[in-house]
Image (cartoon, helix red, strand yellow):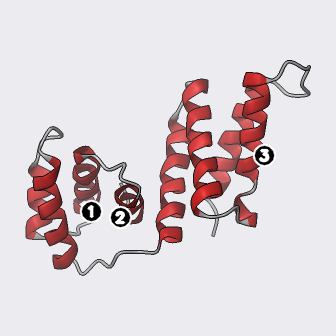
Amino acid sequence: METNALFYKIQKRMIRTEDYIKWSHNLLKTDVSSKSLNIISSFPFDQNIFEVEVYFKRAINELAIEKPTLERCARAYIGHLANEIIKENNHSSTFDFAYMIYRIVASDLDYPNDLMEWYEISEMIDELRNGDIPLEFDENDVISRIKNEAGKYLNRD
């Protein structure tokens, strides 16, 4: 997990021990290392989160990482979810990831213009799931649009 995405999960109190460990592995793969980061990477996923958080705070200090803004964290987490969408083959899970992105766009970022497509996608999903009128699109059309938008997000400048 990327550092800013990890900070988003921390700020939203969605963090799990596994997230810290995956974060440490990600940094070690890019040749970023510190004593505490190495310790985090050795923990099992069922390690007590409070112990892991002690080493996380130490690692942040050792690596001189500053806490990013909420917007930066939210956009990084959207990138994480977009990656999950690209890998996902289950339509229901893809819809769930798209909804998660929409909730971030709505609640944390206050509908920025560059992410309004996610609002439209959430509306399409709602119409598919709850509507009782004939639609001009089907589930495959929506999945295609979600995957396309996720790819565009990941490939933006």
- Quick check: marks 3 and 1 in contact, CB under 8 Å? no
- Quick check: marks 2 and 1 in contact, CB under 8 Å? yes
Q: Earlier in the sequence, mark 2 or mark 3?
A: 2
Q: Earlier in the sequence, mark 3 or mark 1?
A: 1
| Residue 143 seen by the camera | yes
- According to the picture, the residue beneath numbered tag 1 turns out to be 27
Q: Which mark is residue 3?
A: 2
**108 or 145, nearer to the observer:** 108
Locate the C terminus by quadrant.
bottom right
Q: Residue at x 10, y 54 (%)?
A: 51
Q: Quadrant of residue 116?
A: bottom right
- Quick check: marks 2 and 3 in contact, CB under 8 Å? no
Which is closer to the viewer, label 2 or label 3?
3
Q: Earlier in the sequence, mark 2 or mark 1?
A: 2
> What is the spatial separation of the Cα atoms under label 2 and label 1, in whole angstroms?
9 Å
- According to the picture, the residue beneath numbered tag 3 turns out to be 120
Vertical arrangement, residue 67 with respect to residue 89, above or below: below
For label 1, the SS is helix
The percent position of residue 115, horizontal first and vertical second, equals 70, 59
Task: Indicate the amino acid at tag 2.
Answer: Thr
